[in-house]
Amino acid sequence: MQKPIYLDYCATTPLDPRILPEMLPWFSEQFGNPANLTHAYGREALLAVHRARERIAALIGAKATEIFFTSGASESNNLVFKGLAHLAPEKNQVMTVATEHKSVLCSAQAMAERGFDVEILPVDSQGRVNLERLSAQISEKTALVSVMAVNNEVGTLQPIEEIGKICTERQVLFHCDAVQAGGKLPINVDDLKIDLLSLSAHKMYGPKGVGCLYLRQKSPAIPLRACIEGGGQEFGLRAGTLNVPAIVGFGLAAEWARSEQTEELARLKLLRQRLWEGIQAGVSEVKLSCDLDKSSPAILHLCFGGLKKGKLVGQLKDLAVSTGSACSSGSGKASYVLDAMGLPESQMDNPVRFSLGRFTQEEEIEMAIQAVIRTIQTLRENPSRIPF
């Protein structure tokens, strides 16, 4: 049975085949615990972890000592919010955006339950936050502003550089969930004035189950406290034995992404443009959720009209696509991201997120265009034949 064309790179990416051979020895003969430095097994594991830190740091313009490993960006996001809870009551306000990933919004809600003032900023029709409103909401009580670089559902690019300047001027910590930007778009934490940044390896062709938090070294130090207590790993910020094979893979994924980023970015722009033009030429009642020049070149989010609600994605049998976030795809609820952007209900009936990646080929884009056109024609001509 032939598998569908994979266009869901925002949900996860396949492990780059160049990475697995480098990971394998750390599952077997090189099995040491990097926290145990009394013998060669532990020391060689520690060196491998340090090399991975260097590679990830180079991807975002940071220092190796500013990279802290976690199980993924969801954990990193939780750590940022909950690790600053002790700043209350002097600093008891956190700010984020209505279209953030659930791990950020749920962490913010947890802070509200602890008595924090949580400001959820609205977005415009393109999914972008209003800078003037953000600046006006910051006060001497603000502990943190958290804004993602690229929206994981519609691809909106937030004005991260401008937000970083505002937060620096107002002496407020700035956190960025950069999961959908890491390895795809240029990131320099110094230029963007980011204090904390979250990444996941499996969104940049690395293994699942590992991510990191970038934590800027500054004076005075950012007073982030551990949420997982124990043996004091990760310089006391995150207890637990490090997953060395996954960390090695993460480091290599970051290195490959950095070396190929410029060419890959240009390639994805062309592929996405062709996908949009092909679908637009062959299908009526289709709208872009976010303008191409305001969104990641890896994401094309479209809303299709003239169909029964919720029928399209399930009938695109030849394509692996989604309606939005993989973390919320099974909920059956309307997209909170599209709702926050003010889209009418009729436009939210059949959204589709096409997300492209390193292994997407031109011929697959052409096949995807024809699959979308063919499926929509069938649904519109014979809506009663759909079994659900």
Image (cartoon, rainbow, N blue to C red):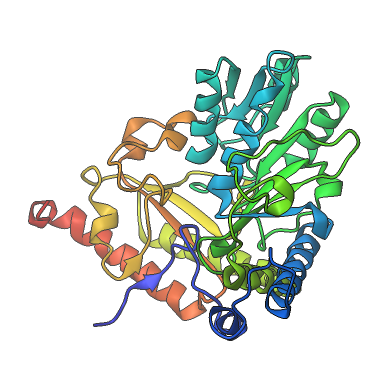
Residue 172: percent from left, percent from top:
79, 27
Residue occupying image coordinates x 45% and y 59%:
354
Residue 247: percent from left, percent from top:
63, 67
Q: Quadrant of residue 16?
A: bottom right
374 sits to left or right of 215: left
168 sits to left or right of 89: right
Whether 126 is drawn above or below 212: the answer is: above
Residue 302: percent from left, percent from top:
43, 50
Residue occupying image coordinates x 59% and y 39%:
227
335 sits to left or right of 13: left
Residue 368: percent from left, percent from top:
39, 70
On the question of residue 96 being in view, the answer is yes
Whether 20 is drawn above or below 118: the answer is: below
On the question of residue 151 being in view, the answer is no
Viewer-side residue, 86 vs 272: 86
Viewer-side residue, 233 vs 117: 233
Viewer-side residue, 288 vs 116: 116
Q: Quadrant of the N terminus?
A: bottom left
Whether 40 is drawn above or below 278: the answer is: below
Q: Residue furthest front?
A: 38
Q: Quadrant of residue 202?
A: bottom right
Residue occupying image coordinates x 74% and y 74%:
43
Whether 129 is drawn above or below 14: the answer is: above
Viewer-side residue, 329 vs 63: 63
